[in-house]
Amino acid sequence: MNPAQRALWYIESHLAEPMTLDEIAAIGGVSRFHMVRAFAAATGLSVMRYVRARRLTEAARSLAKGAPDILSLALEADYGSHEAFTRAFRDQFGTTPEAVRAATCVNQLKLREPILMESTISDDLAAPRFETAKAFLVAGLAERISCDNGAAIPGLWQRFHQEVAGIPERVGNVAYGVCCNGDDSGNFDYIAGVEVANFSDLPRGIGRIRIPEQRYAVFTHTDHVASIRRTVNTIWNQWLPASSLKAADAPNFERYDEKFDPVTGNGGFEIWVPVKQ
């Protein structure tokens, strides 16, 4: 099993027990950083958000069956109080535990069922080449992305292509889609940008990041850009665990050269994944 599959097995088989991201990553045999990326690539969700949603779903089912003690359900779902459980329950379902118990059904709730991993892995991923890239600067449009709202990224690129001419000190004609500043919840900053010589003359509101010198595994994505998630999923959940390398906690990025057509999404591009021994 790949790391995401191992995580799903562990979560579902220990749902009523306390668990941490570190424990789940250990079961997957990878680092916290790797687990966050691998799980998001495979499922579109963050690890602990999935855990919370699954626990709240099972609590909702128990309430609909008439569970009398809400505090006991709260503790089983790893909430320290009735109030904390109720807040999380309302955020998840838009109603209260008491209302679900009174209704005796969950038909109106958007439940989180267990995810069954299946054909989300590509069987034709080409072997990467390896490069050590020197440090460089990227500037462009930035947005905070959660692992389940990646649909916002194409819109960010559309705005980028409308405004790219306004970025001063541009170097070359390559565009970069940089994923950086990730957290344990699967949120990260995405910058649709270009290399620049320096940051001194950038307009207000332009995102910026320094990419450090780093060794990368470089994968070529030849299909339409819309299938990028499948390639990323294969890298993090199949290729990397099977390699002798580990993911480095550093920005990873897509590299779009002149062959890529932003109008049609064709032409191919590269995915640069930071690695270490």
Image (cartoon, rainbow, N blue to C red):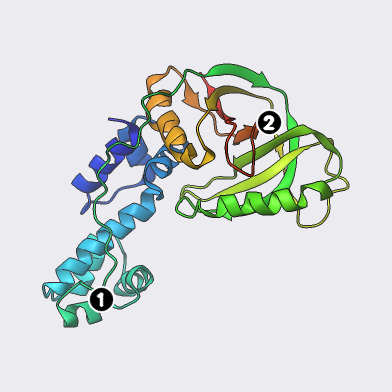
Element class at badge 1 = helix
Q: Is residue 14 left or right of residue 177?
A: left
Numbered disc in front, either 1 or 2: 2
Residue 238's label in the rendered image is none
Residue that lies at the very extreme toward the front in this rendered image? 264
Q: Residue at x 22, y 68 (%)?
A: 60
Residue, x 27% and y 48% (percent of image)?
115
| Mark 2 secondary-structure assignment | loop
Q: Is residue 119 above or below residue 50?
A: above
Report, in whole angstroms, how far the alpha carbon at label 1 lies from the one at label 2.
53 Å
Residue 248 appears in which quarter of the rendering?
top right
Q: The N terminus is located in which quarter?
A: top left
Number of callouts in the render? 2
Residue 6 lies, in percent from the top left, at: 28, 36
14 lies left or right of 2: left
Q: Quadrant of residue 61?
A: bottom left
Q: Is residue 100 visible?
A: yes
Name the residue rendered at 36%, 25% in the picture.
123
Residue 28: x percent and y percent? 33, 33
Amino acid type of the residue tagged 1 in the rendering: Pro
Mark 1 or mark 2, which has the lower sequence index?
Answer: 1
> What type is the residue that disc 2 sits on?
Asp
Determine which of the numbered discs, if any, sits on residue 257 in the image: 2
Pointer 1 residue? 97
Q: Residues within 10 Å of mark 1 (few under 14, many from 20)?
A: many
Q: Percent position (x, y) of residue 71?
A: 23, 71
Camera sees residue 31: no
Pick the front one: 67 or 53: 53
The x and y percentages for residue 269 are 59, 31
